[in-house]
Image (cartoon, grey):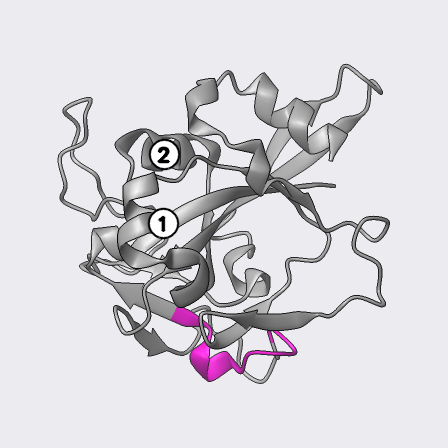
Amino acid sequence: MELATEFVESLGWDNVLFDSSHDKCYCNNCYPTTCANVTDAGGQIYVIPRGWARIGLHVDTVTVGLNDIWNKWIVTFHGTTVNAAESILRHRQFCLPGDILINGNQLGICDGHIPNKNHIYTSPTIAYSSLPMYSKKCDFTSLNDNCDYKVQIVLQCRQKPGSYRVQGETIRAGTTRLCPFIPNSEVEYFTEIRQSVVPYGLLVKLI
């Protein structure tokens, strides 16, 4: 957890984006193998993000109060980059391709992604969201241990049930099983409803 915290602090993001009450570490020491691999959230399977550390994010209290997201919304994951994650948090919502951002730029579709698909994509398993085409590695040198790391980030979200459609993997995995708990035919969700996906944790993995 200390390395994950150091990495996030090195990004220089505004402190108002964070809420330490949502912090949680899923390393083997903090979340041992005797703990469950899956649990329930919002009436659906929640695959625990083993090996990751969650830096808590601030969630709007009005959104929580109106929607009871901690009890009624499911947990999903969104693989992303450092720059894209900061943009999502500063805009206070996911944006769709074609949206005009605060800086005046128009949001496009990332290189390598399927064209003309103007959706927000999430997954019920971090095994899919953390694939390198979704969560690109970046370099980080810790000042605490003077070691070099490759870092991935994934946004952990609450998502409104019934607000999305489900489809199979789109990376041509073939017969390779991507997650032991979610079938390949159900690993990708997509929606056009911006407010239906609320990030509450920045998941960090250092390799």
Residue at coordinates 75% horizontally, 29% vertically from top-left? 2
Q: Amino acid at mark 1?
A: Val
Vertical relation: 132 (above or below) 3: below
Task: Quickly name the residue at label 1.
Answer: 198
Residue at 24%, 51% (x, y): give it. Answer: 195
Q: Magenta span: helix, strand or loop, mainly?
A: loop
Q: Which residues are magenta?
A: 178-188
Separation (CA) of disc 1 from disc 2:
10 Å
With respect to residue 146, does 62 lie above or below? below
Mark 2 neighbour class, 10 Å CA radius: few under 14, some 14 to 19, many 20 or more: many
Amino acid type of the residue that numbered disc 2 sits on in the rendered structure: Leu
- Asked whether 171 falls inside the magenta stretch, the response is no
Q: Which residue is mark 2?
A: 89
Find numbered disc 2 in the image and state the secondary structure of the residue it sits on.
helix
- Look at the image and tell me in which quarter the C terminus lies: top right
> In screen coordinates, is 174 left or right of 140?
left
Q: Residue at x 29, y 47 (%)?
A: 63
Between 105 and 158, the residue placed more toward the observer is: 158
